[in-house]
Amino acid sequence: LKDCADKSQDLQAQSNLCQLKLERAEQLISGLGGEKSRWTSVADTLTESYTNLTGDVLVASGYVAYLGAFMRNYRDDATVNWIHLLGEAEVPRSPEFSLSEVLGDPVAVREWLINGL
């Protein structure tokens, strides 16, 4: 009778441990489901960025090479004109141009902001 009681307690402990493992596995799987949607979103963004890379780098190159010495208003007007010309030529590019997004390093920019630059 004592052996049966010990075996029953052992089986109950194993059952509780198995239930706990099952709950943890369900939490892990649900957490990974959220990661899948996040990674899918990141992949879509990267695909779009890769598609627009040609036009964005073309505008950024022209900006750096030709517009550095001019006032901001003139640079903005020239950039809008270049983007319009790329659209007419059906060159893929981002709808809004940002030099810092095309040529900037997000980690370096973040460090500059932290340092008050």
Image (cartoon, grey):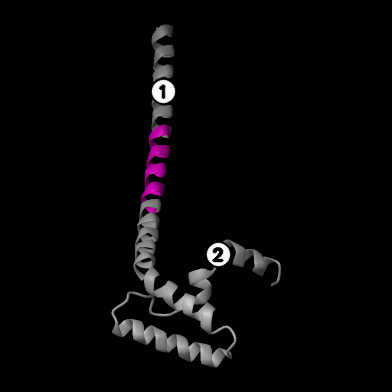
Which residues are the magenta region? 21-34
Looking at the rendering, which quadrant does residue 88 occupy? bottom left
SS at badge 2: loop
Q: Residue at 39%, 55% (x, y): give it.
A: 39
Which residue is labeled 1 in the image? 14
| Residue 110, horizontal then vertical, whole percent | 61, 65
Q: Residue at 37%, 43% (x, y): give it.
A: 29
Which residue is labeled 2 in the image? 105
Dot 2 surroundings within 10 Å: few (below 14), some, or many (20 or more)? few
Q: Is residue 28 magenta?
A: yes
Furthest residue toward right: 115
Kindly identify the amino acid type of the residue bearing the numbered disc 1: Gln
State whether residue 7 is above or below residue 114: above
Looking at the rendering, which quadrant does residue 15 occupy? top left
| Residue 92, horizontal then vertical, whole percent | 33, 74
Q: Residue at 50%, 71% (x, y): give it.
A: 101
Circle 2/circle 1 CB separation < 8 Å: no
Task: Answer with left or right where residue 64 lies relative to residue 84.
Answer: right
Kindly identify the amino acid type of the residue bearing the numbered disc 2: Asp
Q: Is residue 41 magenta?
A: no
State whether residue 8 is above or below residue 104: above
SS at badge 1: helix
Q: Nearer the viewer, mark 2 or mark 1?
A: 2
Task: Answer with left or right where residue 105 lies relative to residue 41.
Answer: right
Dot 1 surroundings within 10 Å: few (below 14), some, or many (20 or more)? few
Q: Quadrant of the C terminus?
A: bottom right
Looking at the rendering, which quadrant does residue 51 occupy? bottom left
Furthest residue toward front: 65
| Residue 73, horizontal then vertical, whole percent | 54, 92
